[in-house]
Amino acid sequence: MHVIYGGTFDPVHHGHLRLGLEISDALAVDRVHLLPCHIPPHRGNTGATSEQRLELIRLAINGEHRLCVDDRELHRAGASYTADTLRQLRAELGPEMPLVMVVGTDAFAAFDRWREWVDIPALAHIVVVQRPGAGIPVGSQAARLLAERSVPGPEALRASPCGAILQLNPPLLDISATGIRQRIASGRSPRYLTPDPVWQRIQSLRLYGACPAGNF
């Protein structure tokens, strides 16, 4: 089973990393692929470039064999669309390999606004992770899709290559990349919210309004 966990990772933090490990445990997979997007289609510009965000992820996961990075979207021009990525992965993995994409309830609630969203269930399974304060509106397309395709456990994801939706409610660290960027911009340290090597590199690159190393 091939599992991808996408996002902007702007910057990567302990919440992202811990969720990756929780997904690995819950689905009993040896590896979860963190997949940073190049240009997010549903938000403004990122605070760091694609190359900088990729570097920070690699620093963050160094030494953790269950997490790896897939940088394919950074090599495509234009906005990063999930359907394009899944088609590329499906072509590489073949028609029988179970392919799983991980999304939060906040993103899944707007699933019908994703480009080519109707094609996605035919390409991959979806794992929906419960986000605090984020629900799926009753009567929404996302709610209908969940009712049609929901499965009770991860074993169902291994039984077919795509098409199922599994809800998970793992313990989450209440950390946000937005909050980290705001903290840095206001001159406060984000230490222990993100790995130390990531924070050191943010300072050396002066990302998000950070001053040079010294307020570590």
Image: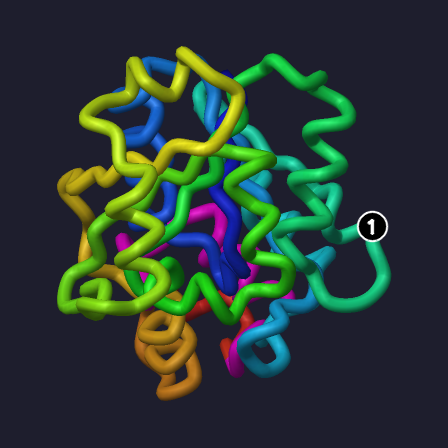
Residue 206 seen by the camera: no
Extreme-bottom residue of the structure:
186
- Amino acid type for the residue under numbered disc 1: His
Residue 193 seen by the camera: yes
* Relative side of 167 to 157, left or right: left
Residue 72 horizontal/vertical position (percent): 74, 42
Q: Nearer the viewer, residue 85 or 69?
A: 85
Residue 109 horizontal/vertical position (percent): 33, 65
- Residue 42 vertical position relative to residue 168 in the rendered view, above or below: below
Residue 172 part of the magenta-drawn span: no
Residue 79 horizontal/vertical position (percent): 73, 67
- Residue 128 vertical position relative to residue 141 in the rendered view, above or below: above
Q: Quadrant of the C terminus?
A: bottom left
The prevailing secondary structure element of the residues shown in magenta is: helix
Question: Residue at point 72% right, 38% down?
Answer: 87
Colour scheme of the picture:
rainbow
Residue 62 horizontal/vertical position (percent): 52, 30
Residue 193 part of the magenta-drawn span: yes
Callout 1: 10 Å neighbours few (<14), some, many (20+)?
Answer: few
Q: Nearer the viewer, residue 38 or 147?
A: 147
* Relative side of 57 to 108, left or right: right
**The magenta stretch spans which residues?**
190-209
Q: Which residue is mark 1?
A: 75
Which of the 4 quarters of the picture holds residue 215?
bottom left
Disc 1 on helix, strand or loop? helix
Question: Residue at point 22% right, 23% down?
Answer: 153
Q: Nearer the viewer, residue 142 or 133?
A: 142
Question: Residue at point 57% right, 36% down?
Answer: 122
